[in-house]
């Protein structure tokens, strides 16, 4: 083999390695921001700074994305990413339930069977979150099987999936606003959100992913930046009050 052939083979091997690295980062990178938040909750034994509705948004988004993949088989990488993200959100909810039940002063337990919107997604038992997601998945499965041949339905499913994912940071943004503070929220988590959203949006564009994906990524970046601005604003307010 001549020098040119060796060079082409080397470049091909480097590109394959880079592609595999990018795919691995896409699969597991979305879960990484929750590691510092998980550690922060464990350390402080307090869940007030983290909005568990972030988990709700991501669970719905990724369940819908899995059914979107069934109707329109895009990159396998994005399907695997959804599976990893669902498992990550269950891990976060399990930790939050454990901490809240340990710190609970009142004996009142809020359950899924209460059927009260006031306590929706504020349940005391981790099993209730599992049951809700199971029911939602079964519902999606039935509807998808009935309408799988409809292009309009499949595209709508994809749009709903990315719309929910684009709203990922909104519950955290609203909780920070309600608390007038970002205390208890991991800033590292939001920085990793931002870095991850920039990376994946670039990935979507370069890989000609469905338009819904890169639009979602762009919206997420804007929300991430808004949360980071909250961190600066509320920290300045705290310093002003102390001064």
Image: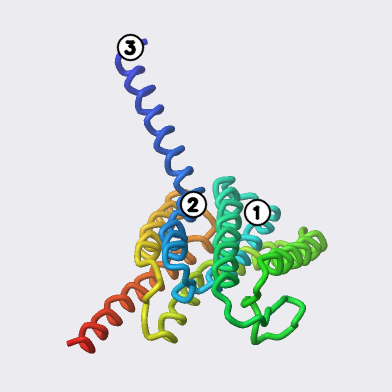
Q: Name the residue under label 2.
A: 208
Q: Residue 69 carries which label?
A: 1
Q: What element carries label 2?
A: loop
Q: Residue at x 34, y 71 (%)?
A: 225
Badge 2 or badge 1: first in the primary sequence = 1
Left or right for 89, reference 218 = right
Q: Looking at the image, do the residues carrying marks 2 and 1 touch, with CB atoms under 8 Å apart?
A: no
Q: Looking at the image, do the residues carrying marks 2 and 3 touch, with CB atoms under 8 Å apart?
A: no
Spatial separation of the CA atoms under disc 2 and disc 1 = 15 Å
Q: Which residue is drawn at 37% across and 30% down?
A: 14
Crowdedness of circle 1 by 10 Å Cα count: few (<14), some, many (20+)? Answer: some
Residue 59, position in %: x, y?
Answer: 61, 64
Q: Which residue is drawn at 41% across and 33% down?
A: 17
Crowdedness of circle 3 by 10 Å Cα count: few (<14), some, many (20+)? Answer: few
Where on the picture, by quarter, is residue 62?
A: bottom right
Looking at the figure, which quarter contains the N terminus?
top left
Badge 3 or badge 1: first in the primary sequence = 3
In this orientation, which residue lies closer to the viewer: 90 or 215? Answer: 90
Where on the picture, by quarter, is residue 232?
A: bottom left
Residue 86, position in %: x, y?
Answer: 60, 57
Left or right for 11, reference 16 = left
Spatial separation of the CA atoms under disc 2 and disc 3 = 35 Å
Residue 216, position in %: x, y?
Answer: 49, 66
Spatial separation of the CA atoms under disc 3 and disc 1 = 44 Å
Looking at the figure, which quarter contains the C terminus?
bottom left
Q: Name the residue under label 3.
A: 2
Q: Looking at the image, do the residues carrying marks 3 and 1 touch, with CB atoms under 8 Å apart?
A: no
Residue 119, position in %: x, y?
Answer: 65, 83
Q: Which mark is residue 188?
A: none
Q: Is mark 1 on a helix, strand or loop?
A: helix
Where on the picture, by quarter, is residue 164?
A: bottom right
């Amino acid at each position: 083999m001549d020098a040119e052939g060796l060079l082409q083979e080397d470049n091909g091997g480097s590109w394959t390695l880079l592609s595999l690295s990018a795919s691995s980062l896409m699969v597991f990178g979305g879960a990484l921001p929750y590691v510092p938040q998980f550690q922060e909750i464990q350390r402080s034994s307090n869940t007030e700074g983290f909005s568990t509705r972030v988990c709700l948004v991501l669970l719905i988004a990724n369940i819908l994305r899995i059914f979107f993949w069934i109707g329109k088989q895009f990159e396998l990488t994005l399907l695997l990413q959804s599976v990893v993200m669902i498992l990550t959100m269950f891990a976060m909810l399990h930790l939050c339930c454990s901490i809240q039940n340990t710190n609970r002063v009142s004996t009142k337990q809020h359950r899924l069977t209460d059927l009260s919107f006031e306590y929706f997604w504020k349940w005391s038992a981790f099993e209730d979150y599992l049951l809700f997601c199971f029911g939602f998945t079964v519902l999606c499965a039935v509807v998808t099987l009935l309408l799988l041949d409809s292009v309009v339905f499949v595209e709508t499913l994809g749009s709903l999936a990315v719309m929910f994912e684009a709203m990922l940071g909104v519950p955290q943004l609203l909780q920070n606003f309600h608390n007038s503070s970002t205390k208890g929220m991991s800033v590292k988590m939001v920085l990793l959100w931002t870095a991850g959203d920039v990376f994946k949006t670039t990935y979507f564009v370069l890989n000609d992913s469905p338009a819904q994906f890169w639009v979602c990524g762009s919206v997420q970046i804007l929300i991430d930046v808004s949360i980071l601005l909250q961190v600066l604003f509320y920290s300045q307010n705290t310093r002003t009050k102390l001064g």
